[in-house]
Image (spheres, coloured by chain):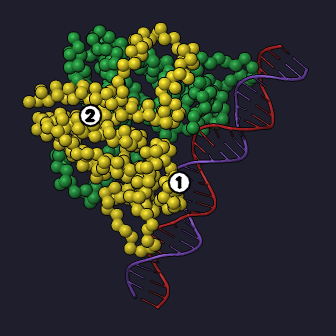
Chain colours: A yellow, B green, C red, D purple
Amino acid sequence: MKPDTSTAVRGLELLWGATERPSRGPKQGLTSDAVVRAAIELADADGLAALSMRKVAERLGVGAMTLYTYVPAKDELVALMVDAALGERPVPVGEGWRELLASVARGLWELYLRHPWLLAASSERTPIGPNALVNYERELSTLSGTGLDSTAMVSVISLVAGYVAGAARSAVQVIEEERRTGQTREEWWHQTSPVLDRLIDYASYPTVVSVADADSHAHGPAENFAFGLERVLDGIEALIATRR
Amino acid sequence: MKPDTSTAVRGLELLWGATERPSRGPKQGLTSDAVVRAAIELADADGLAALSMRKVAERLGVGAMTLYTYVPAKDELVALMVDAALGERPVPVGEGWRELLASVARGLWELYLRHPWLLAASSERTPIGPNALVNYERELSTLSGTGLDSTAMVSVISLVAGYVAGAARSAVQVIEEERRTGQTREEWWHQTSPVLDRLIDYASYPTVVSVADADSHAHGPAENFAFGLERVLDGIEALIATRR
DNA sequence: GCAGTGTACCGTACGACGTACGAAGATCTA
DNA sequence: TAGATCTTCGTACGTCGTACGGTACACTGC
């Protein structure tokens, strides 16, 4: 039941760069970084579910079991991938908490769009690595001087991060579905609507129908994200106003 | 590359209750509903990742391949599970859009806590079933009379749903980690902090450390959820105020 | 300089997974 | 009643993560 703790410890040491090259044995032909990079490229191309140790090995031109001399297990590889991707986040820029927090949110949103597999990986509890921690430091620092106490600061950052992940999920689901099926949303609808027309009594859902009829004016993913972010920031602003 | 469309169509027909008992052949020993219920019980107990057709079959006392006479494939089984679980959501109650929307959010939050596997399943694009559609109708209806146009209504519901899912994910991650490792968070920290102390220079993260030192006052998951929901609702309220 | 030790590489094999396929038996229809 | 249809499920296949151990490489300490 309990995972092997030596695997977890070794994973943490890898994350934090605390491993050293062995002094004996054959020279290594790869590095952990190279393994992580290859895995990220594969996940970017095919998603996390399609990532396998055999595929990473093939991409690097080695045998699958070779990878285990660089990372202790697949879970640890994913944790390393997550932290490596988080290293791509820009430093937040702007004047005042609102602009800074918006910058945080946009950086995270863009990261998710670049690496959609992060959303699947983030569903698992991964150990915190150096990039994740420096990001967290930057995020919390956007709220310095707002009058919020520690608990509220943590909760606000959690709210924003949760919101961004949710919005990114919605956006990514559409993209992934199209990739998986090879059909655009319009093609899917064209194929499926006759079936749904047969199955669903649309008269039972008047508000849904009314909204769907207006769907030609719908926001794209980026607009949806921006809309929701403004709402979230408005809500936080109302909170901060009560603390000053 | 393209999934088998007959599987998808059959899945939709199952979702919407449009399948009929065959008139020939042996009497069925099970029903699709029974298969879905068994799968939900297993997912509730062990999570979605641990759900397999073999385990469902074992639970029902049949061979694994028997299940395929009831559901076309595992993906379709998961879609049926999702819609069945969504059938547990209560009708929103309250006076005015804010109370109604808060009720929507709480119902969804409680559902995720009862069936944490929903979060993993919701990451995949599942076809929409009758319970999902009636829920969507109810959600949209909470915003009737607010002056929001269709696009804004859709975006607001998406915001709230995305927020709830994000908050639930955070809460569930802690629970799942404890179940997976058999360790409470305190036990994990007790075991791991010596390793982290060795690896991490905490002085580089002053805001994180300051916040972590105050962590004894931290919110639990339910308080975190309620806090964030108020912020989200405040933000929506600011929006609605501009439309009236 | 060499024996002993530690490590890289990786083939093989195992258990687990989803599900294609087809044999055997049950039940209905014309 | 023969033929068609359907249920059940064993077998097998390809894929997955990784345990295990054999072979070769490279360092350490005597």
Q: Is residue C30 above or below residue A78?
A: above
Chain letter of disc 1 in the image: A
Residue identified by numbered label 1? A54
Instruction: Please provide percent x and percent y for residue B120.
Output: 44, 35
Instruction: Please provide percent x and percent y for residue B236.
Output: 25, 21
Q: Nearer the viewer, residue B114 or C22?
A: C22
Instruction: Please provide percent x and percent y for residue B113.
Output: 38, 30
Left or right position of A160 against C29: left
Measured in 3D between alpha carbons, the distance from the residue under mark 2 to the one under mark 1, in whole angstroms, is 37 Å
Q: Nearer the viewer, residue D2 or D1?
A: D2
Visible in this render: residue A153?
no
Q: Secondary structure at mark 2?
A: helix
Chain letter of disc 2 in the image: A
Disc 1 crowd rating (10 Å Cα; few below 14, some 14-19, many 20+) is: some
2 and 1 marks on the same chain: yes
Q: Secondary structure at mark 1?
A: helix
Left or right position of A112 against A198: left
In the rendered image, which quarter is residue B158 located in? Answer: top left
Q: Nearer the viewer, residue A85 or B173?
A: A85
In the rendered image, which quarter is residue B152 located in? Answer: top left
Q: What residue type is disc 2 on? A: Val
Q: Quadrant of the N terminus of chain B?
A: top right
Residue shown at 8%/30% (left/top)? A244
Residue identified by numbered label 2? A160
Left or right position of B87 against B198: right
In the rendered image, which quarter is residue A48 located in? Answer: top left
Left or right position of B228 against A115: left
Residue shown at 32%/39% (left/top)? A110
